[in-house]
Amino acid sequence: MLTGFILIITAHSQALPVTETIYPTKAECEAIKARLNERRSLAQLVCGEVFK
């Protein structure tokens, strides 16, 4: 069962969560990702699915 989406940063072949926040929709996660990319354009951020 899909719980939501988390924001993940990829670095050195590892995926680490940016925060513990679980966003209910992918669109909401993508909006936060876009805001963070404005400040940190080199960061490789991805919205990942969270299952329960």
Image (cartoon, rainbow, N blue to C red):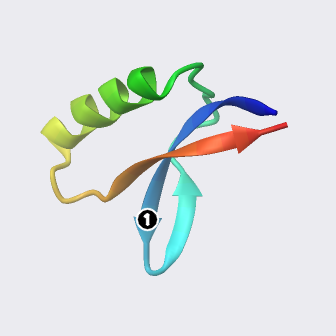
x then y, percent, for residue 39: 16, 39
Residue 29 appears at what percent x and percent y?
44, 29
In this picture, is 29 found above or below 50?
Answer: above
Of residues 50 and 1, which is closer to you in this image?
Answer: 1
In the rendered image, the quadrant that contains the C terminus is top right
Tell me which corner region of the image, top left, top right, bottom left or bottom right, holds residue 21: top right
Identity of the residue drawn at 77% across and 40% down? 51
Q: Quadrant of residue 9?
A: bottom left
Coordinates of residue 23 in the picture (x, y in percent):
56, 23
Q: Is residue 37 above or below residue 44?
A: above
Which residue is found at the position 56% from the left and 38% from the top?
6
Q: Mark 1, residues whose alpha carbon is within 10 Å: few (<14), some, or many (≥20)? A: some
Viewport quadrant of the N terminus: top right
Residue 42: percent from left, percent from top: 18, 59
| Residue located beneath label 1 in the image | 10
Which residue of the protein is positioned furthest toward the front in this rendering? 1
Instruction: Give amino acid for label 1.
Output: Thr
Decide if residue 49 is on the left or right side of residue 28.
Answer: right
Relative vertical location of residue 9 with respect to residue 10 in this rendering, above or below: above
- With 16 as the anchor, is 35 left or right in this view? left
Q: Residue at x 31, y 25 (%)?
A: 31
Q: Residue at x 47, y 29 (%)?
A: 26
* 20 relative to 26 in the view: left or right: right
Instruction: Tell me the quarter of the picture where residue 30 sits.
Output: top left
Tag 1, which secondary structure? Answer: strand
> Looking at the image, which is closer to me, 51 or 44?
51
